[in-house]
Each structure stands twice: as C-alpha cells, then as structure tokens.
Image (cartoon, helix red, strand yellow):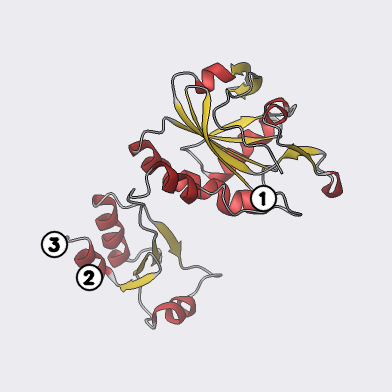
Amino acid sequence: MFKNREGQNIPQVIFPIRQNNDWVNITSDQLFKGKTVIVFSLPGAFTPTCSSSHVPRFNELAPTFKENGVDEIICMSVNDTFVMNEWKKDQHAEHITFIPDGNGEFTEGMGLLVDKNDLGFGKRSWRYSMLVKDGVIEKMFIEPDVPGDPYEVSDADTMLDYINPHAKKPDDVVIFTKPGCPFCAKAKGILRDANVDFEEIELNKSITVRAVRAATGSDTVPQLFVNGQYLGNSEAVAKHFKVG
C-alpha cells in the first residue's frame, strides 16, 4: 500500500524546464505557494491511458475547476522536459501545466516512485492525483496497488466531485460536418455564439456519409450529438441552443 500524505507539505524540488529555447529552473514554491493546485501524476508521456483519458479530461474540465477555485492544473511525469513539451503540443492541452520530474525527485518525495523495469521504463510515477493548497496536500487519490496500471480514482471527474459534487460539467458535444456545407457553417456558428465547446468530425476519405447514416439514420450533415444523445441537424442545433 502507498502512504497517503494528506496534511503534509509537498516535496521541495527544483525542476529544470525548457522554455523558449532557454533553461529555466522552477521551484516547488513557485508552483504551489499561495495557490490552489491540482496535480495528477502518471507513468509516462505518450502512453495510452495517459494520452487518451487522463490528460484530455483534465484539460476539458479545467474551466470548471477554475470556476471552483483551482488556480492551476499540473501534469507530472518522470520524463524529461523536451518530451513533456512535445506531449503538451500533441495533446493540445492548453489549460494544463506540464512539469517534467526528470530525476524522479518529486515523485520519490511523494513515496510514489515505482519500478517499471518490466516495461523498459525504469523508475516511474505511480498514477495518482492530489489537491494542494498553499503547498499542503489536502486530498489524495492514489490508484490501488495492484498489477498493471489501474485508472480508477485519479481521474478528473473524481477530483471535481470531491471539490464540488454539484459542479456543472460541460456538455460533450460532437458534430458531423463536411467541407463547403453552408448548413454546417451555420450550425458551428450557433455553437460558437452559445460558447459551446464542441468536437468536429469532418467527412473525408476515412469518415464517409455511411458513418453518419449508421449513427443517425440520415445521409445529410450537420448532425449533432450532446452527451451521447442524438439531436439532429442544423435546425435541431438552433432549437436546442435557443437561437433564431
């Protein structure tokens, strides 16, 4: 079992970080002093669960966390600064600060540095998240000490439910479109005017109208989904978001 460190100070570490082609040393105090900070730590950049779930959801919920008093969200990993910088770009995670714990000093201080030699990773971080206020750990969610890479409690939704179980989470909005479609442009304009964050799936050689027909029963675009529910075309978008 890993030790829960709630009520303790975070480790004092200096992180060498590459910023704008220069080396900059960032201290633990600079990251945590006088702030409310979420840290989520994971085994490695560009690894499957970390890239497909852990980072994207924290990035999606970042505005909601900010509304609920969180100043910064930090992704920590035992990787070098070049890898972490490239991973941030690849993830389009503009709301998250990526901190390289290249020597594993912070993670070791947390008691969560583990041996991943079987995967050729060497020493890496166990997966966890924590809420830190003015350098003191208020809450920790540590994944269970079982084989593999469990992902059950360190996710963004669990952290948000702890901070504010009644917080309004953003809708998951997906819209099917195709280039040059005026109705698609109208629908996307409606979503932007309503300040709705959405993901666009544009028809191409890989994604054809057959996929739209299979998902919606219609051959036309745009087609909109909100929180897994099919809403319909551009008229449905306007009606749902009370435009026009």
> In the picture, which quadrant includes the C terminus?
bottom left
Query: CA separation, marks 1 and 2?
Result: 47 Å
Residue at point 42%, 41% (across, down)? 62
Q: Residues within 10 Å of mark 2 (few under 14, many from 20)?
A: some
Q: Which residue is mark 2?
A: 235
Q: Position of residue 156 (x, y in %)?
A: 49, 47
Q: Residues within 10 Å of mark 3 (few under 14, many from 20)?
A: few
| Marks 3,2: beta carbons within 8 A | no
- Camera-side residue of 70 and 18: 70
N-terminal label among 1 and 2: 1
Mark 3 or 1: in front is 1
Instruction: Name the disc covering residue 144, or none.
Output: 1
| Marks 1,2: beta carbons within 8 A | no
- Camera-side residue of 164 and 63: 164
Q: Secondary structure at mark 3?
A: loop
Q: Which residue is mark 3?
A: 244
